[in-house]
Image (spheres, coloured by chain):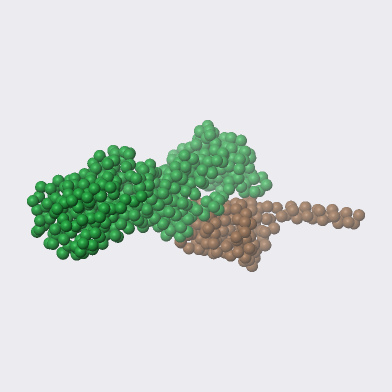
Amino acid sequence: MRLIILFLSLLFLSGLGKYYSEDVLLKCKIEMIEYRGEGAYIAVSLMDENDKYLKTLYVLGEDKTWFFDMRLFWANLKSNGLIGDDAYYAHVDGITGPTIGGGKNLVVPLLLNKSEIGKGYKILFETAVEDKGYFRDDLTFELTEKSLNDSFEGTGFIKTIRTLSN
Amino acid sequence: MILSIWRYCHFSLAAVASIFLILASITGAILAFEPITDSLKNYSINNLNEISLKETLSVLDKKFKEVYEIQITNEDFVSAKVLTFSNQTEEVYLNPINGEILEKVKPKSKFFSFFTNLHRSLFFKKIGRVFVGIISFILSLITLTGLMLLIQRQGGILKIFKKIKENNFSEKYHVVFSRIFALPIFLIAISGAYLTFDRFVVGDLRNSMLLKEEILSDNKYLKFDLIALDKVKKIIYPFSKSQSDYYAIELVDRSVTVNQYTNRIYSQSFYPFSYFTKEWFYNLHTGKGNLLLSIILLVSSISILFFIFTGFKISTKSTLKNLKIKYLSSEKDSKYIILVGSEKGNTFEFAKFLSTQILSFGEKVIIKPLNSYKIYNQAETLIILTSTYGEGDPPSNANDFVSRFKKFNQPNKIKYSIIGFGSLKYPKFCAFATNIDRMIRPLDNFEKIVPLMKVNRRSVEEFNKWIKMWNCSKLTKIKFNEMEIET
C-alpha cells in the first residue's frame, strides 16, 4: 500500500514537474544596424549564471563552412565533440536560418524551458560578418519574467532586439 | 595586324585564366545539378494565380499555432516558417489551399554548399569573390575575341555557319562547337561578372535605396482577397499584436508594410531597376526554377573544359613550331633567304627541311617570317613558303610583307621561287601566295627559278614535285633531296 502511495505521489510529482517544465517560446525580433557588406552570422546561446555555455538555441547562417567565424559557438561545438560527426549537423540543422544583412530585421523563435527562467541564465547573441569583424557579446540579456517582453540594444551589428512571449 | 591582336588576346587571356576556368566550369557543371534535382521535387503549385492571399492566410492560421513568414519561390513552391501546436518551429513546403504539409524544407545540402563556395569564392570570402568575378569577366572577353577570330576565319559574320574545312580534330571541333556555345558561355560569363559587380557595387546602392521607403499619407488599402499568390514573393507576419507591428509583404514589383487590422498600406518602396537586372542575371546564371536552362548550363560548362583542352592542344602545336625557327646564319651574309608566312607554324617544317640541306652544301641560309622582310646585301636566292588565311588574307606573320616589299629595294638581282600552302576545300586556294607571285613576277630585279607551286593540305608529293622542278632548273647549284612520305 505504501508502495502504491509512493508510486502515485511520484507520478503526481513527475506530472507536476512536467507541468512546471513547460515550453516557453520566446520570439526575438532582431534588427540590424545599417552596414554595407555580407549578411551576418549570428549564434544564439543559452549561458548559465557563471557564463558557462549550456546550449545553442539558434544559428543564423546556413553555410556551415563559415560557422567557425562564430568563435564561441564553434569552441562549444568543439568541446562537446560535435564537429565532424554527423550528429553535429543534426544538432544544428533544426535551428538554422539564413544570414541577415545590414538594415534588415528577422524574427527568431527560441524554444526555452520554464525552468530556465529566473535562475540567472542568460541569452547571448554573438555576431560575425565576413570581413567586418566579430562580436562575442553583441547582446546579452538575463532570462527573467520581465525580459520575456522587452527590448534590448546591441553593441555590434545588432541594433535592437525585441522579445515577446505569450 | 588586327587578326593577330585577336588571336593574341584570345590565347593570352585563356592562358592566364585557364586553371581557374577549369575549376569554375567543373564546379559549375556540378552545381547545374542543383536546380535539376530541385525540379524533380514536385511541390510546385500550378494555379498560384487563382489562390488569393486572404484564403492562404486564413487556412494557415487554422493549421498552425503561429506563422512567421510565407515565401513563394521561383519554382512556384510555397514555403512557410511556422510554429506547430506542439511548439516546434518548422519550415515546410505546403499546399496553400488546404495548408497540407508537403515536405520539410531541408537546408542546402553540404555537397552543394561546398561547391557553391568553391565556385564563387574559392573559399577566400570577399577577395575570392572579386577574383572569381574578374575571371568571369575575362571569360566573356575570351568569348568575344574568339567570336572575332571565328568571323575572320569564316570570312564575314554571315558566313559563320558555313562548313568548317579543317582536318585536325582539335582545330576543327574548337571552331565547330564555338559556333554553338559562344552565346551560352558568353551569357554565363557576363552574368557571373555582373553578379559580383552587383554584390559589391550595385547591391549596396540598391539596399540604401530600398531603405528609403515612402510613408503613405492617404488611405490606401491592400486588398488581401484580390491579390493572388503569383503576385507575392514573401509575407512576413507582424511581430506582435501591437498596432505598430505591420505585415511586411514583398510583391513582385514593390514591398509594402500593411496594418494587420485595417490592411491599410503604411509604407511602400518600389524596387529599383537594378533589382530586376540582378534577378534576371541570377536566374540566368544558376538556372533556378528552369530545367531546360539548367541543362544548357550543364552542357555549356562541360564545353568550356573542351575548349580549354582543344585550345591548349592548338596552341602548344603552334608555339612548339615557332620555337623551331632558328636563325641559322646572320642576315648580313646569307645568300639564301627563306621567308615563311604561316598562321599556326605548320609551314616552318618545310622551310626547315630545305634549310638544313642548303647548310649541308656549305651555304649560309636564314629562315624568317615574311614580316621581317628587309634589305639583304648578300642575298642571291629567295624562297617564299606561305599559307593563306581565311578569304585570301595573309597569315598573321605576313600581314606587313606587301608594304615592306615595296619599301625595300634589293641591291642584287635575286632568284626566287614561291610555294603556296592551303586547302583545295577553300575557294580561294593559296590566294595570298598567288597575290605575291603576281607582285614579284613583273619586276626586273627578280628572276623566277620555278613557277608558283600550290601545295594542297601539306601534301608531301606536291612539295616533292616542286623539288623535282627546282632540281631541273639551271639557275641554282643546290639540289634538294625529296621529302620522305610519311606512312
Q: Name the residue rendered at 52%, 54% in the picture.
A: B114
Q: Residue at x 70, y 53 (%)?
A: A22
Q: Is residue B257 left or right of residue B198?
A: right
Q: Residue furthest left?
A: B444
Where residue B276 appears, x then y in whole percent?
A: 41, 43
What color does chain B have in the rendering?
Answer: green
Residue B474 visible in the current orientation: yes
**Of B474 and B456, the residue lying toward us:** B474
Give the percent coordinates (x, y) of residue A106. Answer: 53, 51
Q: B177 or B380, which lies in front? A: B380
> Between residues A141 and B123, which one lies in front from this camera angle?
B123
Q: Nearer the viewer, residue A98 or B330?
A: B330
- Left or right placement of residue A164 versus residue B467 in this view: right
- Name the colour assigned to chain A in the rendering: brown
For the point 52% across and 37% down, the residue is B229
Q: Name the image quarter holding the N terminus of chain A.
A: bottom right
The residue most toward the top is B50
Circle count: 0
Location of residue A113 in the rendering, given as x and y in whole percent from the top left corner: 67, 55
**Residue placed furthest toward the right:** A1
Q: Residue sitting at 28 percent across and 55 percent down?
A: B349
Q: Is residue A30 visible?
A: no
Residue B385 pos. (x, y %): 22, 52
